Amino acid sequence: MMMIVAITACAVCLVMALVRTALGPTAFDRVLAVNAIGTLVILGIALHGFIMGRPEFVDIALLYAILNFIGTFAVLKIFSTGSLGDHSTGAK
Amino acid sequence: MMDMLVLVLSGLSIAIGVVALLIGSLGLIKLPDVYCRIHAVGMIDTAGASFIILGMIIHQGFSLVSFKLALICVLWFFTSPIATHAVAQVAHKMGVKPVGRHLVKSAPAKKSKGKS
């Protein structure tokens, strides 16, 4: 019962983060909102597994957690240095 | 008796997490600046997600699934502050000005305040 309330709250928060992604003034607002959307999707996957009685979905949630972190850093690195580090021009 | 206790504890933890999630998401919409919104996203990532995962761990008991949930929780506990700090650092480096009391008279602060 409580899990259904939690997944509904996840959906509501995801819509709010989508609104911020649509009208964020700078690109960093959008990066931040996409990071929050990733967190909420991970929570939704885990809660969906618990509601449906198959908690093995936690593996997929763990994979998404790592992908969310690496994706945020890749986008920030493109913003900051202009490339993904082909010629080792970082740390300036 | 024990089942009732587990149910109440996990429900209470998930309720705290849901409240933190809603507050953080409302702050993501209402706050006026990138640096303020980082605070709200940090609240979603640490308080909301950690309490909901703690509730799922209590609901599940001691097994492999609860160990994986604890692994997700530890991963978030270390990677979420790093990600938000990197966003703040890159935004500061690219010249995004924070909205403050001494910057209210300048034009970009008013513009971003009117938009949000």
Image (cartoon, rainbow, N blue to C red):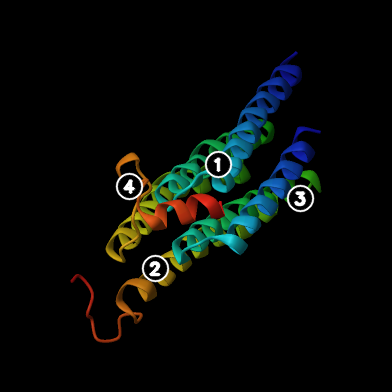
Cβ–Cβ under 8 Å for marks 1 and 4: no
* Mark 1 or mark 3, whichever is nearer to me: 1
Give the residue type at disc 3: Arg
Q: Secondary structure at mark 3?
A: loop
Give the residue type at disc 2: Leu
Task: Give how far apart the Cα atoms at labels 4 and 2 are.
Answer: 26 Å
Q: Secondary structure at mark 1?
A: helix
The x and y percentages for residue A47 are: 71, 46
The chain identifier of the residue carrying mark 4 reads: B
* Mark 4 or mark 2, whichever is nearer to me: 4
Which residue carries the number 1 mark?
A: B27
Question: Does B22 sit left or right of B36 as displayed?
Answer: right
Q: Residue at x 65, y 35 (%)?
A: B18
Q: Residue at x 38, y 73 (%)?
A: A79
Q: Which disc number belongs to residue B103?
A: 4
Cβ–Cβ under 8 Å for marks 4 and 2: no
Which residue carries the number 2 mark?
A: A76
**Looking at the figure, which quarter contains the N terminus of chain A?**
top right
Q: Which disc number belongs to residue A54?
A: 3
The chain identifier of the residue carrying mark 2 reads: A
Q: Quadrant of residue B30?
A: top right
